[in-house]
Amino acid sequence: MPSNRGFSLIELMVTVAVMGIIAGIAFPSLRDLVINSRVSTQTNEVVAVLNYARSEAIKRGLDVMVCARDGVNLGNGWFIIPGTACNFDPDPCDPDSRDPLVLVCHESLKEVAITTDRASLQFSGRGGLVGGAVTLTFSAAECRIGTDRKREISILGSGRIAVERKPCS
């Protein structure tokens, strides 16, 4: 009698069931990892921009502004320019009419909201933040209660920047 090699229907069904259980456990964790990674990456990107603006102010010995592109919310994009005022007309980041003084232009952040009480930040030539300390709060679009998908960037009057992870509320 020939010997048959292969899996029985029961063995295949058990294997599929075990794979389903493993996938059910792994996918939500993977999704959380991706969302947390996105928030951390974009937070780090903004911290790098703020550090760049501060270092440019110190290097030049002049004030440097980080301005919201729309004049309202830094989450909708920003640009960095030396001086003490943000000029929005014409659009300083438009390739056709770009202001040669603009150091950096950045598009809006994806799936992350920034809340703050300022539309611009000004670093003095000594590296301090003009106008006193400020906090920028980052929240993931999917910020559910009980998850740590919020970040707070605190900028002290001295210009020192610190990031803290916060729970969604």
Image: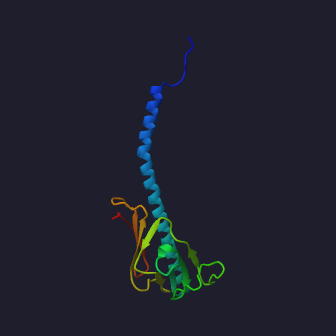
Q: Quadrant of the N terminus?
A: top right
The residue under the point 33% across, 60% down is 145
The colour mode here is rainbow
x, y percent for residue 90: 59, 85
x, y percent for residue 105: 57, 76
Up the image or down, 30 lies above or below 42; here it is above
User: Of all residues shown, which one is farthest toward the top?
Assistant: 1
- Work out whether residue 75 or residue 66 is closer to the camera in this orientation and state it: 75
- State the image quarter where residue 131 is shown: bottom left
- Work out whether residue 55 or residue 119 is closer to the camera in this orientation and state it: 119
x, y percent for residue 114: 44, 72
- Work out whether residue 5 or residue 84 is closer to the camera in this orientation and state it: 5
Up the image or down, 101 lies above or below 77; here it is below
Q: Quadrant of the C terminus?
A: bottom left
Q: Is residue 99 left or right of residue 112?
A: right
Q: How many marks?
A: 0
User: Of all residues shown, which one is farthest toward the right?
Assistant: 96
The residue under the point 44% across, 80% down is 159
x, y percent for residue 116: 41, 76
The residue under the point 46% across, 77% down is 73
- State the image quarter where residue 129 is shown: bottom left
The residue under the point 43% across, 77% down is 160
